[in-house]
Image (cartoon, rainbow, N blue to C red):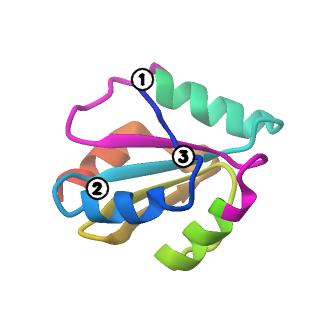
Amino acid sequence: MNWISLTHLEQLDNIQEASKLKPQLIFKHSTTCSISKMALARMERSEVPDSIDFHLLDLLNYRSISNAIAEKFHVFHESPQALLIKNGECTYDESHGGIQMEEIIEQANQ
């Protein structure tokens, strides 16, 4: 999987704009959490569609970006968390064991 590292607050505007042409997924990952590591590994073992851009946020190093994501896309912060952004809005929000590539793809295609 080719993750796009989410390291700058300005990237959120770019993600929101890009989502008008192609779904964008933000995966919020805690590097010290075993559940987050399992969810990330499950994502990386999945077949990755070209129809979605995948962004990875290191939650511990970029907590301010995580807070901005919650505010910008009107979601409650969780970790790990996957957010699908389409047409400028968060249309799918899942956390922990609920994060499944098949469901992400299904939501992206709706």
Q: Looking at numbered disc 3 in the image, what kind of residue is underneath it?
A: Leu
Please report the bounds of the magenta region as a residue range: 45-64
Residue nearer the viewer, 98 or 58? 58
* Residue at 28% from the left image edge and 64% from the top image edge: 17
Q: Position of residue 76 (x, y in %)?
A: 63, 73
Q: Position of residue 79 (x, y in %)?
A: 69, 53
Mark 2 crowd level (few <14, some 14–19, many ≥20, 10 Å Cα): some
* Callout 3: SS: loop
Q: Position of residue 9 (x, y in %)?
A: 56, 61
67 drawn magenta: no
Identify residue for label 2.
107
Front disc: 1 or 2: 1
Q: Looking at numbered disc 2 in the image, what kind of residue is underneath it?
A: Gln
Kindly identify which numbered label has been placed on residue 1.
Answer: 1
From the image, which quarter does the N terminus lie in?
A: top left
Tell me if label 3 and label 1 are in contact, CB under 8 Å. no
Q: Looking at numbered disc 1 in the image, what kind of residue is underneath it?
A: Met
Quarter of the figure with residue 14: bottom left
Quarter of the figure with residue 48: top left
* Residue at 73% from the left image edge and 38% from the top image edge: 35
From the image, which quarter does the C terminus lie in?
A: bottom left
Front disc: 2 or 3: 3
Residue nearer the viewer, 54 or 15? 15
Identify residue for label 3.
6
From mark 3 to mark 1, how far is it between C-alphas? 15 Å
Q: Position of residue 64 (x, y in %)?
A: 71, 64
From mark 1 to mark 2, how far is it between C-alphas? 19 Å
Front disc: 3 or 1: 3
**Is residue 14 rendered to the left or right of residue 79?**
left
